[in-house]
Image: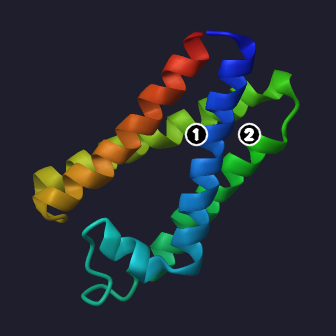
Amino acid sequence: MSKADREKAITAIAAGRVGIGVAAYLAPNLSGRLFGLDPDGNPQASYLGRLFGARDVALGAGALRSPRKQKDAWVAAGMACDVADVGAGALAGLRGTLPPASAAMVTGTAAFFAVASAWLLQN
């Protein structure tokens, strides 16, 4: 992979994080519903959605605004959060605290970002 392609991929992942994070922060209930969650049944969900949103905006903005030498650190930090999110989604699915489809969606999304980040860090 060329340096230019790698930079484009990092930018795409970072921009995706910012987009998802902004949506989760500004519209946590809608974002939760898109992932199959029930914010009406759990009024605390909007607070947790905003925490997640702020985290993803920070990770994405850090990767977008960093000098090239520091981008890998932001990608690695994002990957660590994604791996933790995979674990959280899998546990929620196994324990039944999320419906199976929701657990698969949140776990799959986090796994995609974790694998993409790992791949970028290896290239």
**Residue type, label 2:** Ala
Q: Residue reaching furthest right?
A: 67
Q: Which residue is mark 2?
A: 63
Which corner quadrant holds the N terminus? Answer: top right
Q: Quadrant of residue 110?
A: top left
Q: Which residue is mark 1?
A: 78
52 up-or-down from 116: above or below: below
Residue 91 location, x and y as percent?
A: 22, 49
Q: In the drawing, does residue 47 fall left or right of residue 25?
A: left
Residue depicted at x 56% and y 11%:
122
Which corner quadrant holds the C terminus? Answer: top right
Tag shown at residue 50: none
Q: Quadrant of residue 30?
A: bottom left
Residue 73 location, x and y as percent?
A: 71, 28
Nearer the observer, 27 or 43: 27
Disc 2 to disc 1: CB gap under 8 Å: yes
**Residue type, label 1:** Gly
Q: Mark 2 packing: few (<14 Cα in 10 Å), some, or many (20+)?
A: many
Residue 13 location, x and y as percent?
A: 58, 40
Residue 68 location, x and y as percent?
A: 84, 25
